[in-house]
Image: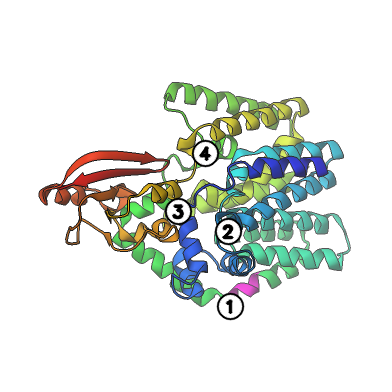
Amino acid sequence: MTLILGLALILRLVLFNQSLWLDEAIEALALMGRQGPLLKYALADFQPPLYHFIGYFNTHLFGYSEIALRLPSLLCGLATVYFMIKIADSIASRRVGLIAGLLVATNPLLIYYSQEGRTYAMTCLFVTASFYYFMQLLRKKYLSKLCAIYYVLFTTAFLWTSYLAWFVLLAQGVYVLWKKRYDILAFQAIAGLTLLAWLPSFLTSLGIGHSTLSGSPEWGRVVGGLTWKSLPLTWIKFNLGRIGFDNKMFYGVLVAGVGLLHLAILRTVPYKKYLILLIWLIPPIFLGLITASILPIYSYFRVLFVLPAYLLLLALGSTKLSKIVIGLNILFLVIFWLSPRYHREDWRSLVSNLPANIALAMPSRAQSAPLFYYSRGQDIIEPSHDLIVGNPIYYIRYVEDIFDVRRVGAAKLQESGYTITNQLSYPGIAVDIYTK
């Protein structure tokens, strides 16, 4: 186990100090107190507040650097590997435990979100730990008090970090009713009842979400609207991570090949024996997709907490083929490392290269958090609405497809006598330099 955890740590430290991207920068400013009261920010973020409170204490101890902001996610990623090995050991064998640990340690998507200052790796840990103790309780006729306490704590924790994770408790509850383990149901009720304290805030958060969706329908499509791609994209990202390929034929053949490999592994799994893993995997995705037809909350990274269940199923299948999956994980990681276009938005490099006497403009000033974090966010022009002044103007065309679909900002810059004299490109960011 120690060697696997060491490998997991090494893989998660590669590119760990990337620039913060938009959501991470917003989180950083919120923890600094620059977004107003932290609880008010949590409502607008449309997530329960536990991650923000943990982040608050973490940053007060370690500061607000990129590394400090991502430290909780890194630790949660490593702890997820630990609990995966423990689960596989307890339900199968030591050999399966090692394979499961390696699958989690090398999975590109789990590594990516172990490096992000957001809630997803933490939710993944809490759900995985909850299922470990849930399985321990199910196996024993008489409850272990310590095991029950840990189960309640981790279940409560994931309920307070992700709304989509609420479906996990629902699935667990249905399962214990079917098994007639009413003693466990009582502990689930204790965890669930803690949410009563958050219910008024949840309703407020729900109202904010509906209001934002009404004002910007494109926002809903981008952040989690339901499309025909939602389910297949979840599987692809779960296994290939954040990479993609411009050659669609090659990409399709690669995905099909990986899919056939996984089918060959999964067809050997005795599902009746491991039904609990399907309870973990399927209901949150299915219910999340249904919910997304009403409110745009579904994205593959928001259901990251079911990925360990899928990897456990792969570990329980053909051992030889599972080793091939581990090899592919490393290959996809190397492709990711060597391809900056897949990396996080590089606001740090952009800001460090900006000349002193320029004007900055964006389609939406509300998306300027990374500029403020890197200390260049003052006096940003929104060309579609503001008086256009300054020369030259660096127009950062960030999320233009959401907040300026008709390209009003660019048109007004041209109407005001500005022309594009140069263009800059950073991972995730395009900049047009307008000179009058």
Which amino acid type is marked by label 2?
Leu
Q: Are marks 3 and 2 in contact (CB under 8 Å)?
A: no
Q: Which mark is residue 292?
A: 3
- 337 lies above or below 431: above
Tell me the distance, in whole angstroms, between the alpha carbons under discs 2 and 4.
21 Å
Res. 225 visible in picture: no
Whether pointer 1 and pointer 4 mark residues with C-beta atoms closer than 8 Å, the reply is no
| Label of residue 242 in the image | 4
Identify the residue position indicated by label 2 in the image.
69
Q: Answer with mark 3 or mark 2, whichever residue precedes in sequence.
A: 2
- Residue 353 visible in the snapshot: yes
Q: Is residue 194 magenta?
A: yes
Marker disc for residue 46: none
Q: Position of residue 169 (x, y in %)?
A: 65, 61
The reply to whether the C-beta atoms of the residues labelled 3 and 4 are less than 8 Å apart is no
* Magenta segment boundaries in residue numbering: 192-197
Query: In terms of sequence position, does the residue under pointer 3 or pointer 4 come before the other?
Result: 4
Q: Residue tagged by mark 1?
A: 197
Element type at mark 3: helix
Q: Earlier in the sequence, mark 2 or mark 4?
A: 2
Q: CA distance from mark 3 to mark 2?
A: 29 Å
Query: In the image shown, does 397 or 266 lie closer to the viewer?
Result: 397
Three-letter residue code for mark 4: Arg
**For residue 379: magenta?**
no
- x, y (%) of residue 122? 63, 57
- Name the residue located 40 percent from the left edge and 51 percent from the top edge: 351
Under mark 3, the amino acid is Ala
The secondary structure that most of the magenta stretch takes on is helix
